[in-house]
Amino acid sequence: RDRSIIQTLVSSFGSYRREPQVTLRPSARSSYARILAQADMQPALILRYCGVVVIGAVICGLFIGWLSSVPTLITGCLAIVMAVRRRARQRSDELERDLPALLTSVASSVRAGIDPLSALAAAEEFFPPTSTIARELGRFNRDLVAGADEEVLVRDLMSSIANPDLELFKRCLTLSRRHGTSLADPLHRIVRVVRQRQSFRRKTRAALAMHRMSAIGIAFCATAIGGIQAVMNGAGITIAWAHPIGSKLMIGGVCLISLGVVWMMSMGKEEKL
């Protein structure tokens, strides 16, 4: 009997065919559109910034020299990219700060007998009008009054901001709307999980900040020692540089220190935490 059961299980698993999973890599255009959506910036505004950068590069080329226009153009483009990423990170930080308050408000309203969507729409009044979560809830209220589909509204709620805790809340809200289950207890559990995650993230960022400062301190000490040697014993530095192996060792040391600093600064980015 056991043998027949094992044969049945083996045959059933053998007849099961998994479909091949195809992983589609996002294109550059979709990645840029996603970053702009996270920063809540329109492409027209980015085009204006690019126009200002091009005009500045042309002016530098006319007055200083055309060779200076290339660094100006590169610096301007990098400044635009950094500004967009900074804006996206700022919106994500604001949402992470206000999300526990939103979940607590919705959970308390649901426990009092209010519909979850009505509680979510009324939560806009508890946040400053200029905050990210207030603007997103304002869009949600306008679409809800316009008669949009409720499940689509919940799915698209703050979809431009990447936050795993928010996705957990939206899935919980969708399941409760589909099956009619109570949402108060799951929301309180989500609030507890969100606070634990935020505490863990703060501790991780503090530890990473300490390691980054250590790397910067080591690089600064190495640079200071090199500067002191160059000032106090410039002839020795010249002799060491003129040696066939000395110049390679110096360049290799600078490259290793720079690589270590870059590696430490790239650890634990906001997207990985």
Image (tube, grey):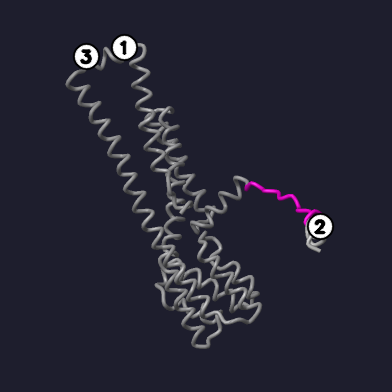
Alpha-carbon distance for marks 2 and 3? Answer: 83 Å
Q: How many marks?
A: 3
Name the mark nearer the viewer: 2 or 3. 2
| Residue for badge 1 | 242
Of all residues, the one furthest to the bottom in this rendering is 113
Give amino acid for label 3: Ala
Q: Residues within 10 Å of mark 2 (few under 14, many from 20)?
A: few
Q: Secondary structure at mark 3?
A: helix
Q: Which residues are magenta?
A: 12-26
| Residue for badge 3 | 235
Q: Residues within 10 Å of mark 3 (few under 14, many from 20)?
A: few
Residue 186 lies left or right of residue 221; in this view the side is right
Judge whether residue 30 is colored magenta.
Answer: no
The residue at the point 44 percent across, 42 percent down is 78
Judge whether residue 13 is colored magenta.
Answer: yes
Residue 59 screen position, x and y as percent: 41, 36
In this rendering, the answer to whether 181 lies above or below 13 is: below
In this rendering, the answer to whether 183 lies above or below 237 is: below
Q: Which mark is residue 210?
A: none
Alpha-carbon distance for marks 1 and 2? Answer: 77 Å
| Residue for badge 2 | 7
